[in-house]
Image (cartoon, grey):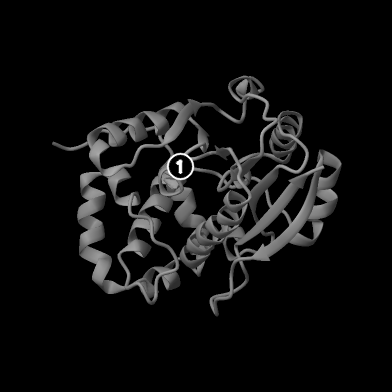
Amino acid sequence: MVEKISSHASISARAVCLCRALESTQPSGSRQLLDVFAKYFLTEIERLTLRSVANWGTRWIEIASQGLYQEVIRRHATTDSWLEEALGSGIQNLIILGAGYDSRGWRFARPGLRTIELDQAATQTHKRQCLKRFVTKFPEAQVELSPVDFRFSSWPDVLPSFTQSSVVIWEGVTMYLSREEVIATAHTLAGKLGRGTEVIVDVLLPNAPMRGTSSPTRLGLGVLGEKLKWFLPLHEAPSFFEPLGFKVSQLLELGDQPTGPSHIGLIRLSRL
């Protein structure tokens, strides 16, 4: 039976999940990321596609995407590494904004860790279906799925205030919001999070190859139907986030490909 997915579910979230699943099929000595759960969020057609291309390696998609594939994988792997560091200090809450088909709530599951995923309802509906279908493949974990739309002012109502140690992952979201919506979301987080809470966020860089209207990467994203709205130079991150209540502790450009400048910057913040 062909799976039906709401037309409002995030296609970019599905594309990122497929990238993680593809990377996880590569030999252990060459892959940057292992996500054993990503494949369970794919449709049957996507799983067939994955099996067909898994032996091709990933160089073809790195070239076709102007290096974006490698940056998406590096973004996820680096965020995982920073999360591992925070888990070592005993955090109790993991909040994922725009979670899509993220699997960290299960990959990093441990006693006492609560994971809250926020994303649009259509995406979460399909994710719940996948979790139900493959329930035996996932470990016990305290993962809560809460539907929100970051474009509307009511979304903070579903997010409790956190006095316990927490980490927020805000990945693959800001580029689809306006500057005003990014600022409003950061203000909301500042009001909900305790001092020292870590926030990991990515941004699109203004010199990204996808910025040109004729860019293959941008045209591909246009086909996905999700418009890119906001870019931020990494050197401007401190002056942008500090007035909103966050100190920048680490900045990282994710591209080092011969295909051109980086698409994505990764920022590690701490609540002031």
Quadrant hosting residue 94? top right
Instruction: Using a 10 Å C-alpha cutoff, classify the residue at mark 1 as few (fewer than 14 neighbours), some (14 to 19) or many (20 or more).
Output: many
Observer-nearest of 95 and 206: 95
Observer-nearest of 98 and 89: 89
Let me know if residue 207 appears in the view.
Answer: no
The location of residue 223, given as percent across then percent down, is 43, 49
Quadrant hosting residue 156? top right
The location of residue 40, given as percent across then percent down, is 28, 46
Q: Is 6 left, or right, of 51 in this rendering?
A: right
Q: Residue at x 40, y 35 (%)?
A: 9
Residue farthest toward the bottom in the current orientation of the protein? 258
The vertical placement of 151 against 54, above or below, is above
The location of residue 200, given as percent across then percent down, is 64, 49
In this rendering, the count of numbered labels is 1
Q: Is 57 left, or right, of 225 in this rendering?
A: left
The residue pinned by badge 1 equals 105
User: Element at badge 1?
Assistant: helix
Q: Residue at x 21, y 46 (%)?
A: 44
Q: Is 272 left, or right, of 113 in this rendering?
A: right
The C terminus lies in which quarter of the figure?
top right
Amino acid type of disc 1? Gly
Observer-nearest of 186 and 28: 28
